[in-house]
Amino acid sequence: MQTPAPVEYSRASSVDDVIEQLVKLDGKARILAGGHSLIPMMKLRLANPGHLIDINPLESELSYVREEGDEIRIGAMTRHKDLLDSELLQRVFPNIFEEAEWVLADPVVRNRGTIGGSLCQADPAEDLSGVITALHGKAVVKGPDGERVVDMHEFHLGPYMTVVQSTEMVTEVRFEKGPGQHGSAHEKVERRAGDFAIVAASAALWIQGGTIADAGLACSAVGPTTMHIERAEQMLIGQAPSEDLFAQAGSIASQDCSPSADGRGPVDYKRHVAGVLSKRALSRAAANALR
């Protein structure tokens, strides 16, 4: 079936207006931004929200990439194309956003899709969630009781499930710059260009005085949510960067991910690829930091 069920439609005038509408509709509504995930799901009757609240009128309010003190802040309506082109992101977090965005879908999706929509869709094979997890990002969630800030590794509860309640919305994503020299990278294996990942790995390193002061590692498409490889991160901190060290981290990623067999490959293959991509991403992140 390729026709969505009947749906009511309204346009938002402000973030507060979105929250008021969600409360009034008792949470029986979905927020429409880019729509590249929601609309196909509605056509297949996998989603039947009953009411759509279009937040595109809020682009001037919620679309930005800016530096505030020791943080980088990205508005939830920021399009993928703007993330790809951001000089600020390329300067502060070189490579990782650019590399992830280049392999995310196609130009049509990148021109309209948003960072907030990607996170809230909560597809386990989605690229940006891994990037944000590796960079220790946090989502700002606003609802009738005010704002709360959620660590990205706690944001996703399961496939297509997040901590965002039915009367809340994501307004921003925040990152701390971190100590020392930074380098990051994104690696992905896909069946064809623009496809969802078979496996993807995002890595971030902060190197100070020749040792790793902080580390981030996440894998996509190898679990019910984006997999935060925390055990490898802890093992890396305080160590001098080396290929042997990154191989150990890759081995941990292989062990700690939780893939399922499907049309994209068996479990053993996905575990192996997760380890290879994690090692490769970490190695390139270190090279980027030490340039």
Image: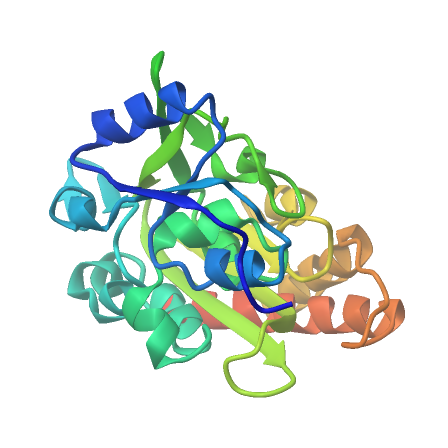
Please state the total of marks drawn on the protein image: 0
**Position of 231 relative to 186 (above/below):** above
Asked if residue 204 lies left or right of residue 192, the reply is left
Picture quadrant of residue 82? bottom left
Residue at x-position 57% and y-position 53%: 217
Residue at x-position 53% and y-position 55%: 130
Picture quadrant of residue 285? bottom left
Asked if residue 196 lies left or right of residue 275, the reply is left
Quadrant into which the N terminus falls: bottom right
Q: Residue furthest bottom?
A: 192
Residue at x-position 49% and y-position 49%: 6
Indicate the position of residue 7 as horizontal and vertical percent values.
Answer: 45, 46
Residue at x-position 17% and y-position 47%: 57
Asked whether 145 or 286 is in front, the reply is 145
Quadrant into which the C terminus falls: bottom left
Residue 130 in sight: yes
Indicate the position of residue 167 as horizontal and vertical percent values.
Answer: 43, 24
Indicate the position of residue 38 as horizontal and vertical percent values.
Answer: 49, 55
